[in-house]
């Protein structure tokens, strides 16, 4: 190297000085007699504090030009050096350059940081260090061997450094003997400014948002630092990448959590969690004060996945989405590969924390209490390791991960997942009530029919899932589009209750059945009758009588249960008395009239303590199963239902004229509101 080819070096804010480790800086440049290799080592060690300018014209060199002249910190080196310098100070770095037999642990934000940080450490502090990376330890035997090697090297005066995401991934002898622990934090605004200055040689704006890199993994950061980029261009890329990861750049239109009343208890929990996140950012609470997570359960189509996206948006954190099926799709499916995929899932969430980790179909992870012995041999290690990873993720050691899981089968979820300190609670999402149905309808209408009164239309959708309501709106838009006009309310009603040809005999039977339910609900004062609808709706039923059952005044009593059962039995009873025989419409599945009446009466005897015994045998959910398997319970339920059937028959005979009047109107109009049915009954009496 000659003086002609040597670029001029300038310190950014102070007179530049170069010194070898352990010496006092005394000159602008080392003597020309210093060997070129030694100069290069010093150059690399101190380069991040310098701006390199061409000797002709004092212009900052581009990274490509400089790379051709002399080693220049690339994107990876700049980012790692900035983060490492942010995590240490001069005293720590001088200690690492000393000749002491130190035991050092370096904890990094995520797995993708381990190798780059290790490479920087070796380049800066010498190759005499024994380096251990957690990702190179695959088995307990390897960890044991590494532990012995660490102990031997320290005993002989050689320094040892370990790189990991968590201390548990390193050999025990190193974690026990560590003299120094360095935690490299995920980059914030100051770290990004320093990295940009190293990479471009130009100052970055001082007003960079501290959360500019939130949710980004190491490779995401590297992708933003491109050759010949200006600081402004790098910042734009970082902001765009962070927005993509956090979901804020998504074109998906999401409702506000505050307005999502259809989610009930899940919404209440989500609002509290969002408030906790805000308090945590303001320093009012510690991460340990935030909920660890929850399991959302419901029947299909009620928006559990959508809720996770709404929740992440409300909390202002990235959403990391996995399903248990991903553990197999992303690996060959062998036991060790599935466990590695499970760990990688939590490491991915840890790398972008704080975040919400959404685990869909959590019941695909088997419940150990119900596993067959053959299945237990394979699944037990997977479930056990999953639980350990979950503990580490939500333990609050680092800020932090909130785990939100979802399932259609809460019984299939291992009880160990739901204990305090893990997922903690199970929250059921039920079918929306009238207010929820109207809210979902307004959301999917997206500004259309803004001034229309959707009260009656909402009653048509009572008990429908969010997916069914979305389908109804899509159908209404199709009707308006084919008619080449704007959407009107009648389009929506037609999509919900499409016109269909029903044979006269079938139409008369359906109307009679629904009129029996409607009149019985008013006569026995069971619930609040909202509407009768004839014809298939988005809920795929030939007829529906919508009754809002009691829930706000008092708890259910035996009388309440019996009146509700009479209403359920009144439909088939009206068919039998007014037409001459009943059809199969009252049964057929677990949601039918007979199934619901059986379940209510069985629960009354077997779980509510309102029958002939105080013994608790089953829950309401399991009452139908108990009736099928318990002969004595089945006999009690059958006897009780016979008594209620007699009450329903007396009611239909006594109010025969009112039922027939409602049937006539339903045949003509296909749907009646609860108020219209009350007026028909009053006029007929």
Image (cartoon, rainbow, N blue to C red):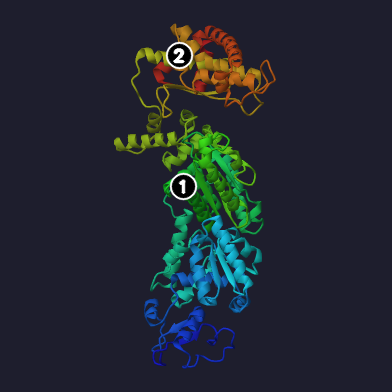
Q: Give the numbered dot on residue 546.
A: none
Within 10 Å of the Cα at label 2, are there few (<14), some (14-19), or many (20+) other Cα atoms?
A: many
The x and y percentages for residue 184 are 56, 66
In what element is the residue under mark 1?
helix
Q: Quadrant of the C terminus?
A: top right
- Along the viewing direction, whichever of 623 and 306 lies nearer the viewer: 623
Residue depicted at x 41% and y 20%: 669
The answer for how far apart the CA atoms under marks 2 and 1 are is 53 Å
Up the image or down, 18 lies above or below 304; here it is below
Name the residue carrying label 2. 512
**Which mark is first along the chain, 1 or 2?**
1
Camera-side residue: 261 or 103? 103
Question: In the image, what residue occupies the spot 54% across and 87% down?
Answer: 17
Q: Answer yes or no: is residue 110 visible.
A: no
Instruction: Please tell me how many numbered marks the rendered image carries.
Output: 2
Across and down, in percent, residue 359 comes to 51, 45
In depth, the one of 132 and 115 nearer the eye is 132
Residue 522 relative to residue 321: left or right? right
Residue 178 higher or lower than 658, as above or below: below
Horizontal and vertical percent position of residue 231: 44, 72
Identify whether 136 is placed above or below 36: above
Residue depth check, mark 2 versus mark 1: number of the one nearer the observer: 1
Residue 652, horizontal then vertical, whole percent: 52, 9
Q: Which residue is mark 1?
A: 327
Instruction: Indicate the quadrant containing the N terminus: top left, top right, bottom left or bottom right.
Output: bottom left
Residue 54 lies in quadrant:
bottom left
> In what element is the residue under mark 2?
helix
The reply to whether dot 2 and dot 1 touch (C-beta < 8 Å) is: no
Q: Is residue 230 visible?
A: yes
């Amino acid at each position: 190297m000659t003086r002609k080819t040597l670029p001029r070096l300038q310190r950014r804010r102070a007179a530049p000085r170069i010194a070898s480790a352990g010496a006092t800086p005394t000159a602008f440049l080392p003597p020309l007699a210093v060997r070129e290799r030694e100069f290069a080592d010093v150059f690399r060690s101190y380069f991040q504090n310098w701006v390199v300018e061409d000797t002709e014209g004092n212009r900052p060199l581009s990274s490509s030009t400089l790379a051709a002249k002399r080693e220049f910190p690339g994107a990876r080196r700049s980012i790692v050096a900035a983060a490492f310098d942010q995590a240490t100070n001069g005293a720590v770095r001088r200690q690492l350059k000393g000749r002491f037999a130190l035991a050092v642990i370096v904890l990094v934000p995520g797995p993708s940081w381990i190798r780059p940080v290790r490479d920087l450490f070796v380049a800066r502090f010498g190759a005499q260090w024994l380096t251990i990376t957690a990702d190179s330890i695959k088995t307990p035997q390897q960890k044991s061997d590494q532990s012995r090697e660490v102990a031997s090297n320290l005993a002989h005066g050689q320094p040892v450094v370990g790189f990991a995401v968590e201390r548990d991934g390193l050999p025990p002898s190193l974690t026990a003997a560590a003299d120094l622990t360095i935690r490299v934090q995920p980059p914030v605004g100051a770290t990004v400014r320093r990295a940009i200055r190293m990479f471009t040689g130009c100052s970055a704006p001082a007003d960079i948002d501290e959360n500019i890199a939130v949710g980004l993994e190491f490779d995401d950061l590297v992708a933003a630092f491109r050759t010949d980029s200006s600081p402004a261009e790098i910042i734009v890329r970082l902001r765009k990448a962070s927005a993509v990861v956090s979901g804020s750049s998504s074109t998906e239109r999401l409702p506000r959590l505050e307005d999502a009343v259809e989610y009930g208890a899940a919404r209440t929990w989500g609002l509290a969690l969002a408030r906790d996140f805000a308090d945590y950012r303001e320093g009012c609470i510690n991460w340990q004060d935030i909920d660890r997570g929850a399991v959302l359960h419901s029947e299909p189509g009620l928006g559990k996945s959508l809720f996770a996206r709404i929740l992440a948006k409300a909390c202002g954190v990235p959403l990391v989405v996995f399903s248990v099926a991903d553990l197999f799709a992303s690996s060959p499916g062998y036991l060790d590969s599935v466990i590695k995929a499970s760990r990688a899932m939590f490491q991915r969430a840890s790398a972008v924390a704080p975040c919400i980790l959404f685990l869909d179909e959590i019941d695909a992870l088997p419940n150990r209490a119900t596993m067959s012995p053959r299945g237990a041999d394979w699944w037990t290690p997977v479930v056990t390791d999953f639980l350990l990873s979950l503990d580490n993720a939500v333990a609050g050691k680092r800020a932090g991960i909130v785990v939100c899981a979802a399932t259609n089968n809460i019984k299939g979820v291992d009880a160990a997942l739901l204990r305090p300190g893990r997922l903690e609670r199970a929250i059921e999402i039920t079918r929306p009530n009238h207010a929820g149905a109207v809210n979902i309808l307004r959301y999917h209408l997206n500004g259309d029919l803004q001034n229309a009164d959707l009260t009656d239309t909402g009653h048509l959708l009572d008990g429908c899932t969010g997916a069914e309501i979305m389908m109804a709106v899509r159908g209404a838009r199709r009707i308006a589009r084919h008619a080449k006009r704007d959407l009107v309310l009648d389009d929506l009603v037609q999509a919900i209750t499409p016109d269909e040809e029903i044979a006269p005999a079938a139409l008369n039977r359906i109307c009679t059945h629904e009129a029996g339910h409607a009149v019985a609900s008013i006569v026995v004062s069971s619930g609040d009758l909202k509407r009768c609808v004839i014809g298939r709706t988005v809920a795929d039923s030939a007829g529906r009588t919508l009754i809002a059952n009691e829930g706000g005044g008092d708890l259910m009593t035996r009388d309440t249960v019996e009146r509700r059962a009479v209403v359920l039995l009144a439909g088939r009873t009206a068919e039998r008395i007014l037409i001459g025989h009943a059809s199969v419409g009252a049964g057929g599945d677990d949601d039918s009239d007979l199934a619901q009446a059986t379940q209510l009466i069985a629960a009354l005897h077997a779980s509510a303590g309102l029958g002939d015994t105080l013994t608790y045998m089953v829950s309401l959910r399991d009452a139908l199963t108990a009736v099928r398997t318990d002969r004595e319970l089945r006999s009690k339920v059958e006897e009780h239902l016979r008594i209620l059937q007699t009450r329903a028959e007396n009611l239909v005979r006594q109010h025969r004229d009112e039922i027939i009047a409602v049937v006539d109107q339903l045949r003509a109009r296909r749907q009646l509101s609860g108020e219209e049915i009350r007026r028909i009954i009053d006029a007929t009496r």
